[in-house]
Each structure stands twice: as C-alpha cells, then as structure tokens.
Amino acid sequence: MSFSKRISLLKHILILLVILSAGLVSCDRSPVERVMIKTVLGNITLEIHSGKAPTSAANFLALVQQGTYTNACFYRVVRMNNQPHNDVKIEVIQGGLFEDELVNT
C-alpha cells in the first residue's frame, strides 16, 4: 500500500473515530427529573440530572417530596451586569425558607 493511500485510510479512520466519539458524548442517558417552581412572575422548570450528581439530586428531590421548599422565597439574584466593582464575577440565584430559624436569628 502506498504512503498516500495509508494517509487517506488513516484520515478516514480518524474521521470515523471523531464521529463515533461525538455520538457517545451526546448520548447522555442519565435520568432527568423535572421540578417546577411556581412564582408570581411565572414558572421555572428545573432539570435535575441524577446521573451527573446522584447524591445532590437525591437529597434535593427528597426535600421537594417532603414539601421542605413550600413557601420558600428568592432573595438575591447576582448577574454579570449587577456587580460592576467585583473582581470575581458570579451568577447565582439565592433563596431560602421564609420561616428558617437561621434567617430569623
């Protein structure tokens, strides 16, 4: 087999491997639970990926099932554009339980 034919064959094999690996990466088969947060400004749907964070997802879903978050509230939203003087920028929505003992102390 000539050198150019070997290079051509290697290129085709490489392309096939890239296609196969891209397909594997996009095949996330982990279970996804959806939880809806109902607010006066509209609903927010959360996707909980149990396969990516099994312990955190299980803990969160258990608290949802127990009704722990009923009547919770959002109290802080940090966006890139509302922290102009911070060297380290974050994006976060913080919330908590309205009647939480830690908040009332």
Image (cartoon, grey):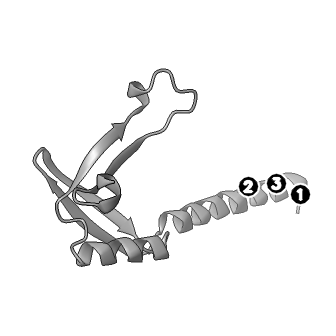
The number of discs equals: 3
Dot 1 or dot 2: first in sequence order is: 1
Measured Cα–Cα span from mark 2 to mark 3: 6 Å
Q: Residue 63, image x and y in percent?
A: 30, 74
Dot 3 or dot 1: first in sequence order is: 1
Decide: few, some or many residues near mark 1? Use Cα within 10 Å; few <14, some 14-19, many ≥20: few
Nearer-the-camera pick, 92 or 30:
92
Residue at 40% in and 26% down: 81
Specify whether 93 is left or right of 67: right
Disc 3 marks which residue?
7
- 1 vs 2, front mark: 2
For the view shown, which residue lies furthest in the top direction?
85
Nearer-the-camera pick, 18 or 57:
57
Are the two marked residues, 3 and 1, in contact with CB atoms closer than 8 angstroms? Answer: no
Q: Quadrant of residue 87?
A: top right
Secondary structure under tag 2 reads: helix
Q: Residue 21, image x and y in percent?
A: 61, 64
Q: Quadrant of the C terminus?
A: bottom left
Secondary structure under tag 3 reads: helix
Amino acid type, label 2 = Lys
Amino acid type, label 3 = Ile
Secondary structure under tag 1 reads: loop
Q: Residue 33, image x and y in percent?
A: 31, 72
Are the two marked residues, 2 and 3, in contact with CB atoms closer than 8 angstroms? Answer: yes
Disc 1 marks which residue?
2
Residue at 28% in and 60% down: 100
Residue at 52% in and 26% down: 86
The label number, if any, that marks residue 11 in the structure image: 2
Q: Residue 38, image x and y in percent?
A: 15, 56
